[in-house]
Image: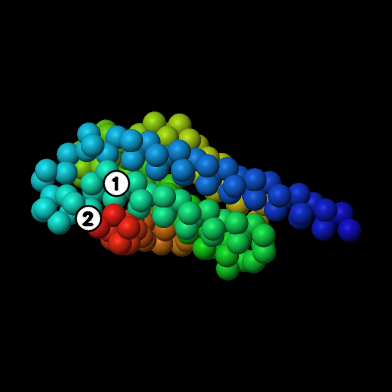
Amino acid sequence: MSDMVAKSSKIVKIEKLMWLSIVVFAIHNFEEWFTIESWDVGSFNPELTNIYAPNNFGVAVILLTLLYGTLVALCNLTNHKILRIAAMLGFSGIFFNAAMHVVSKVVYLMPMPEGIYSSLFLIIPLGLFIYIETLKLKLLEPATLMFVSLIGALVQFPFAFGALNVARLFTGV
């Protein structure tokens, strides 16, 4: 019986962290959205410049936040391992996007919208804590977490670009 109580308290801890990650992701997305006009997209071809218009970008980040929030909610409500992996995959995309914001400020890799403050002070610390707790609580094996993190890092680009293109349906850009 005490194992069940301990397990459930472990799950509750990670669930709270994942709920918090939705709020942190939303803050990051709004930081990007409100500073998108300062982003230098002049070097992009006109088609890409249009999808990064502030109104289109705003719809895209709202869609991404809603999608991630829904995924975390389903994971937390069902506690299904596949959904936990999917939520960690989503969070890994968020975490590595934040890392790219920080690296882009230090070493210019590519033009990126602002988002450095929420990346540096919210997402990266929370992400490290979530990863450590996931391993400490043995919710995922280290190899699984590493694989999911790498996949999340890779799929952040198609998800973001997909959201920008879906946003066009709403904005007409």
**Residues at discs 2 and 1 in contact (Cβ within 8 Å):** yes
Residue in view at x 40 percent, y 39 percent? 30
Q: Is residue 134 left or right of residue 12?
A: left
Of the image marks 2 and 1, the number of the one nearer the N terminus: 1
Please, which residue is most extreme toward the right here?
Answer: 1
Whole-percent x and y of residue 14?
64, 49
Front in this rendered view, residue 160 or 62: 62
Q: In the image, 118: left or right of 55? A: right
Callout 2 amino acid: Val
Location of residue 121 (image quadrant): top left
Using residue 152 as the reference point, say whether residue 10 is left or right of it.
right
Which residue has dot 2 on it? 173
Tell me the quarter of the image containing the C terminus. bottom left
Q: Residues within 10 Å of mark 1 (few under 14, many from 20)?
A: some
Considering the numbered disc 1 on the image, is that residue within a helix, a strand or a loop? helix
For the point 11% across and 53% down, the residue is 46
Q: Residue at x 29, y 54 (%)?
A: 171
The colour scheme is rainbow
Q: Looking at this view, is 138 or 110 the one in front?
A: 110
The residue identified by callout 1 is 55
Which amino acid type corresponds to the residue marked 1 in the rendered image? Asn
Pick the quarter of the image with the N terminus: bottom right
Residue 47 placed where, x, y %? 15, 56
Relative to 132, is 149 above or below? Answer: below
How many numbered dots are placed on residues in this image? Answer: 2
Residue 140 visible, this angle = no
Query: Helix or strand or loop: what does disc 2 sit on?
Result: loop
- Residue 7 lies, in percent from the top left, at 76, 55
Which quadrant would residue 70 be assigned to in this image? bottom right
Snapshot quadrant of residue 20: top right
